[in-house]
Image (cartoon, grey):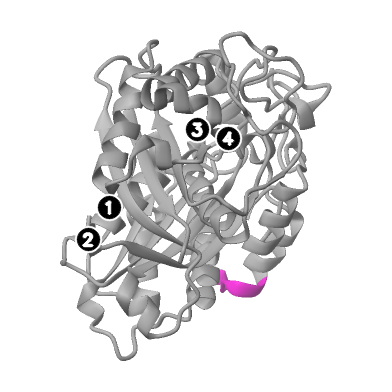
Amino acid sequence: MDERVAVTGIGMIHCLGTNAAQCWESMVAGRSGPGRVRRFDVSDCATQFGGELPDAFYEMEQAEFSKRMFKQTQITVRLGMLCAKEAMSDSGFTADGQDPRRAAVITGSGQVGFQDEDGDAVDFYRNPSKFAVIQEMANALSGWLSIQYGFKGRSYNVATACASGAYAIANAFEYIVSGRGDAALAVGVDAMLSAYSLKAFGQLAAISVRNDVPQKASRPFDLNRDGFVIANGGAALMLEKEPAARKRGARIYALLSGTALCSECYNIVAPKPSGEEMSRSMTSALRDAGIAPEQVGYVSAHGTSTLQNDADETAAIKMTFGKHARKLAVSSQKSMTGHTVGGAGAIECATTALILHHGVLTPTINYETPDPACDLDYVPNEARDAKGLRVAISNSFGFGGHNATLVLERMG
């Protein structure tokens, strides 16, 4: 592909920090964010922990938003708006001097409809407020952001479960490289940690029950993994045409050079065991970018800490890269952040851009016992120098069979 898209701004909030710098520092240090839930009652939940947002986030909310805005929005929208604010400030991009009709806002969130933190929406639906309709609109975040920043191009939300954030970025990328637009703000976010979600995902036997050591519960690719850890969080990326970004002197973290979005058509909650469809996603993205598999040095894995997903993703990586898979570094940021569902793909793409920019690989923490089915280099427990890294990919695989792979290259 002739044109590449520059990542010029990053905003990030999750259990490890309230801005991109804090989150990056914590991930490089290999810190674990999840802990026992403090903000709502979990006494009747089998799983009693998750990745809660830091107390500082709620202070930021109070400082940033009016009482009316609190009434009009859910926490997911406010979280996404704060991520977007940081990304916009970081990029230095404004609609002034630009054609606002060629700037888009594309968001990704797996949560549709109302859900407060304790998971009790009965009163909301029984006695809706005057703002109920706009509170539960799936497109609310993209609408608010378009209004705030004056972007008049495409504006919509993508809901593809755990792949929502990656889908938003891929759609933003395609909007720019197609020539239909010049810039796009892409946001992936979810705040699904609630008593309801803990119980619902528990019914699927999908989440960890390590209540005694929640900080060690998310352990992708480890033999003793027992499920993912629900967490709140999100990230925003400002994307621009590379020549335009260079011309205005923007700092470019990395270049987005190819994407793939595809459907497994297999199972509503499980990937195809062979990893064949995950591999198709990676292969298609590399083809889109014009990148040979041997050029890739790092894979930001979907790596959920579930038995099937981690083994299948490992098989898919080996299927995609052949012998080169043994030379790849693979790691999962979810080992530290937990699984932020719609926020995960955006957090992981943004982190991959930072990895390329700083030349440091974030680790897979809590990796203690190798699994014969997961036999690649998962950058166990400690960050690693990667100054020579040039090309990386970021995977996201969502319930419903929604697969996404993003290809990123180092600037320069």
What residue span does the magenta drawing correspond to? 63-68
Cα distance in 3D space between marks 2 and 3 = 28 Å
The residue shown at (40%, 16%) is 270
Q: Is residue 257 above or below residue 176?
A: above
Residue 70, horizontal then vertical, whole percent: 54, 64
**Mark 3 vs 4, N-terminal side:** 3
Residue type, mark 3 in image: His
Of helix, strand and loop, which one carries label 1?
A: helix
**Cβ–Cβ under 8 Å for marks 2 and 1:** no
Q: Can residue 400 be spotted in the picture?
A: no
Instruction: Work out how far the residue at label 2 is from the one at label 1, CA to CA, in angstroms.
Output: 18 Å
Residue receiving disc 1: 171
Marks 3 and 1, how far apart in space? Answer: 19 Å
Distance from Cα at disc 3 to Cα at disc 4: 14 Å
Q: Amino acid at mark 4?
A: Ala
Magenta region's main secondary structure? helix
Determine the secondary structure under disc 4.
Answer: strand
Q: What residue is pinned by disc 4?
A: 329
How many neighbours does mark 2 have within 10 angstroms: few (below 14), some (14-19), or many (20 or more)? few
For the point 37% across and 56% down, the residue is: 256
Query: Looking at the picture, which amino acid does disc 2 mark?
Result: Asp
Q: Earlier in the sequence, mark 3 or mark 1?
A: 1
Is residue 388 placed above or below 58 in the rendered structure?
A: above
Disc 3 element:
loop
Residue, far right: 212
The residue that disc 2 covers is 2
| Residue at the image position 25 percent from the left and 40 percent from the top | 287
For disc 4, the neighbor class at 10 Å (few under 14, some 14 to 19, many from 20) is: many
Q: Which mark is residue 302?
A: 3
Q: Residue furthest bottom?
A: 97
The quadrant in which residue 32 appears is: top right
Q: Quadrant of the C terminus?
A: bottom left
